[in-house]
């Protein structure tokens, strides 16, 4: 069953009077319940634009978004969605549990349930031993992990993560990958953007390759490798992008 459906989604950014920048151009895809769906693409290809449109943070120029049977602005639907932004900003002087409490309050979660959930989440992201440490003393990996915990505070069905492994060392990447697989096993649907191909290759059930706002290809890695006669994900990535660029702007 599709839990997310995107139909002919377009976003143009306008700068000044007549400069139009393509954020996303006529993109359609769907995400099935329980899968990890990876959005891949070079810098500026439209990954963040797509995720922000889905979260209702940006308004589309045209097209439709359907999440859990509702449009992207539906408040009830949003209770079932968690989001980790690309460059999150946290209050430096809060500790991990305080930050999670702050987010939990925004969702109006009952105190007792919230405290239990915070405890569980801190264990899940392996920050239970750093309970008293202010976020300003966190390493990049710890910040990323507290971000993932924050995006789970409402126990969402759908988790949307914008480049969760950027800036992480290999161990951090492996830990994040294990965490994502653990969350998938708990039944969560995960949509993640990344340009780390090896990461995506290991965790995603299906992928989408974006370039210059276009969705060039989507499917399982095996399907796409066969279709494009590629050697692996890296080759597939380069091939789809080069083919598109050779054809010139459509
Ligand atoms: N607020 C904005 N105003 C104008 N142009 C924007 C804005 N946000 C994004 N863009 C442009 O839209 C295009 C897609 O950007 P987007 O941030 O979605 O790409 P991305 O795939 O997330 O890139 P990255 O991998 O660097 O995070 C780029 O050309 C970018 O410059
Ligand atoms: Mg981005």
Image: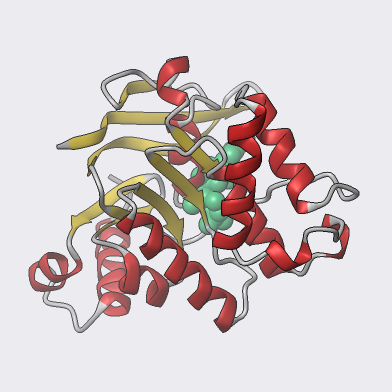
Locate residue 205: give its quadrant.
bottom left
Q: Nearer the viewer, residue 91 or 219?
A: 91
Q: For the point 56% across and 44% down, which residue is it?
A: 151
| Image x and y of residue 114, in percent | 62, 36
Q: Residue at x 56, y 82 (%)?
A: 170
Task: Please give left or right for residue 237 compared with residue 84 in the image.
Answer: left
Q: Quadrant of the N terminus?
A: top left
Query: Outermost residue toward the front?
Result: 112
Q: Quadrant of the C terminus?
A: top left
Q: Nearer the viewer, residue 133 or 192?
A: 133
For image coordinates 53% across by 58% down, the residue present is: 163
| Position of 110 relative to 155 (above/below) | above
85 shown above or below 247: above
- Compared with 223, 53 (above or below) is above
Q: Give the residue displayed 42% in from the left and 30% down from the top.
A: 80
Residue found at the very far right of the displayed protein: 93
Asked where in the image residue 245 lies, by quadrant, the reply is bottom left
């Amino acid at each position: 069953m599709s839990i997310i459906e995107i139909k002919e989604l377009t976003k143009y950014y306008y700068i000044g009077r007549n400069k139009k920048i393509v954020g996303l151009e006529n993109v359609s895809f769907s995400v099935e319940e329980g899968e990890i769906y990876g959005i891949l693409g070079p810098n500026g290809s439209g990954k963040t634009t797509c995720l922000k449109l889905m979260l209702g943070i940006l308004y589309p120029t045209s097209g439709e978004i359907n999440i859990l049977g509702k449009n992207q602005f539906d408040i009830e639907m949003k209770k079932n969605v968690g989001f980790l932004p690309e460059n999150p900003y946290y209050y430096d002087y809060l500790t991990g549990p305080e930050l999670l409490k702050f987010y939990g309050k925004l969702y109006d979660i009952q105190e007792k349930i919230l405290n239990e959930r915070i405890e569980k989440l801190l264990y899940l992201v392996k920050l239970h031993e750093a309970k008293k440490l202010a976020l300003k003393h966190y390493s990049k990996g710890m910040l990323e992990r507290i971000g993932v915990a924050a995006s789970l505070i409402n126990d969402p069905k759908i988790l949307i993560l914008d480049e969760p492994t950027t800036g992480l060392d290999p161990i951090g990447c492996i830990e994040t990958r294990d965490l994502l697989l653990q969350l998938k096993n708990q039944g969560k649907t995960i949509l993640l953007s990344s340009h780390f191909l090896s990461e995506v290759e290991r965790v995603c059930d299906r992928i989408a390759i974006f370039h210059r706002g276009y969705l060039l290809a989507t499917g399982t890695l095996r399907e796409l490798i066969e279709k494009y006669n590629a050697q692996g994900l890296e080759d597939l990535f380069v091939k789809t992008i080069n083919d598109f660029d050779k054809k010139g702007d459509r």
